[in-house]
Image: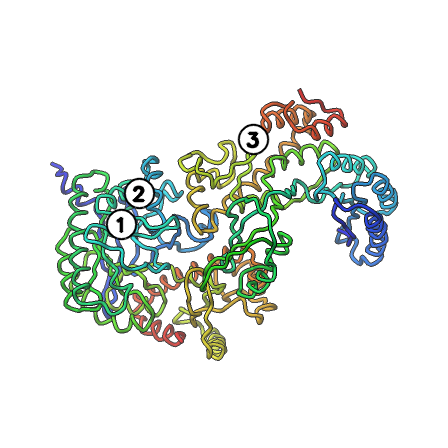
Amino acid sequence: MVCWQDLEESLRMKLSLTKVVNGCRLGKIKNLGKTGDHTMDIPGCLLYTKTGSAPHLTHHTLHNIHRVPAMAQLTLSSLAEHHEVLTEYKEGVGKFIGMPESLLYCSLHDPVSPCPAGYVTNKSVSVWSVAGRVEMTVSKFMAIQKALQPDWFQCLSDGEVSCKEATSIKRVRKSVDRSLLFLDNCLRLQEESEVLQKSVIIGVIEGGDVMEERLRSARETAKRPVGGFLLDGFQGNPTTLETRLRLLSSVTAELPEDKPRLISGVSRPDEVLECIERGVDLFESFFPYQVTERGCALTFSFDYQPNPEETLLQQNGTQEEIKCMDQIKKIETTGCNQEITSFEINLKEKKYQEDFNPLVRGCSCYCCKNHTRAYIHHLLVTNELLAGVLLMMHNFEHYFGFFHYIREALKSDKLAQLKELIHRQAS
Amino acid sequence: MQLDDVVSSTVTGPRVEEAMYRSIRWLDRCIAAHQRPDKQNLFAIIQGGLDADLRATCLEEMTKRDVPGFAIGGLSGGESKSQFWRMVALSTSRLPKDKPRYLMGVGYVVDREARALWEVDSWGPPTLLGEVAFGGNGHRSDLRRLGRHGCPLGAILREYGPVWGSVRVGRGPGKPLRFSAPSRHGCNPSYATDLVVCVALGCDMFDCVFPTRTARFGSALVPTGNLQLRKKVFEKDFGPIDPECTCPTCQKHSRAFLHALLHSDNTAALHHLTVHNIAYQLQLMSAVRTSIVEKRFPDFVRDFMGAMYGDPTLCPTWATDALASVGITLG
């Protein structure tokens, strides 16, 4: 006799850990998606999109990139305003954006654009789109998710604590209470809808910088039947993350091992490794996008056991880069004031005018196989759109390659070497 | 292409003649200086503006030189279509039949009345906010000064000509710069018509920024003209740009999605439309060639005009006249 519940259980996703090394979890999530036949590797990242499309890239160019993650991240801030259209469309956002074969995770906010504070109430959360503010109560939020039909979605939550500085403990407590209330209400609405049951709700861990509240949020959220957890409020700059790493370890210790842990707003290579060591499984891939927007290319090395000649060449290269990084440059980019990191080179610099090397020697991406640094420099100087396309292709491929090497390092117990290599390159 | 001295087709007077003779002299100097004639083809460019006598002189002289191909230059500026086609026809009638004829710049419309309002962010492409009626003085010095803040004013000035009008400057980093410019790129329904008519007149090759530029403005080319996909009417249109088109954009995406993407800051929208518009153009020219090979080009022209204007007899007068001059009648 077949029991429906058993069938349903078997269709649901399964996280199996291959090994746990120094707090790092290596494994796979199986039975993903509506058809239940997708798999994701962890640790891993999600494909960053803007309004349902990888930045600068058409479907065709995206598919020229190797190792594109199985799951893409959509943001409500870019899609909420299209609620009506998607409702009329009926077939879900995956098909609408031309990615029917991809797994989809819908987050509340865009990790690149900071959220203005002061807009969360006991009954609603607001996201900011091009058209302006979109206010969502629980029912409106779930109605939107019903129209989107993503595989996973971040539950409505109060994440404002991370937007402000020096928040009172009262406000922190409220963020935990509100998020739990939103979660319970969303779960209730999910129970009443067959469509919504096909999506997995990701519970959001809040609690600011208060250990007690973080633990409370983790324990309470873990009691609910969520499919995974989003660790919210750890975004910021490298210094703020450092102070929060202890909180992070304590939080993940409270979470069940068989459910995935995502983190929002953390994407830099050094930060990624720190978080993996503290039990995080999935990351957003907006960092390569930010690098692209400032006209830069990722060049950091993640090959922790290259041949000796390569090591020597890379060492010489790294020293040169470090000399140039003595003065940190501030580049004004669209919407944010980001500093150039030591993981990248700035192709706008005059010194690349006649540099006929690829962006990264040995890189297998379309840009490095077909073009030179000099050409990218030229495209940037003449403000050609192609600069963004080629840089995005390279930066995504480089970043996805990095994650592949993280998994390889964990498999062969070489994480310490990889960590040392990355740390050496972080300024 | 040779180095030529080209003046705007709206210029009259002795400057036109000067440019024509200078172009001939420079052609000779190019031929003399050309060191790789076996590897690179040097084309002459016929000048003479809109003056039939000057153009005829230029044709007579340049065809005396043994070049592998000829370009028809000095047109597609601000001249009327009536003058335009007559100069094209004159040129093709006097150029050798066994060498390629390349019409430089087709389908470019200058609309002096409308002005375009632009916005530009960082190093990205300028966004066309809309067409506005403008008058008034410019603050050109403001724009030059603002150009140092890193926005691509140089590129804009090169592409769109002098930029003037009232300017609103955002405060703080990352705020967009707004300015208006003469609307040199209109929405030109006659772009494809220009191509078809000029093929009828005897041109072989064409170039134009129009299809890719209009794509970057959110306009998709279709057999009936174009679709301004940013408009609200396409918000819930779930069909492709053109159901007959085989390009990747039409295979995978709907007008509704492209509409939404065009209203975001993701440049992917521009690339989708660029791919489609190029495909449209390639498909059009392929259809033209097939109809010529199959000896039914006049029928093709009639069908084309029917699709574009509703009825072949409704196509613009200049096009009817041009086609009639080579024996193609519409309706």
Label 3 sits on a secondary structure element that is loop
- The quarter of the picture where residue A275 lies is bottom left
Tell me if A119 is positioned left or right of A129 in this view.
left
Q: Is residue A300 visible?
A: no
What is the distance, in whole Å, between disc 3 and disc 2 at their CAs? 33 Å
Please report the residue visible at 39 percent of the width from the left and 77 percent of the height from the top.
A424
List the residue tagged with mark 3: B224
Q: Which residue is mark 1?
A: A153
Q: Nearer the viewer, residue A424 or A15?
A: A424
Instruction: Give the alpha-carbon distance from disc 2 to disc 1, as whole Å.
Output: 10 Å
Question: Counting other residues with Cα less than 10 Å from the Cα at mark 1, is it few (<14), some (14-19), or many (20 or more)?
Answer: many
Crowding around mark 2 (Cα neighbors within 10 Å: few <14, some 14 to 19, many 20+) is many
Identified at 75% across, 44% down, the residue is B9
Residue A318 location (% of width, % of height): 46, 76
Please name whichever residue, A57 or A179, is drawn nearer the observer in this view of the structure. A179
Answer yes or no: is residue A365 visible: yes
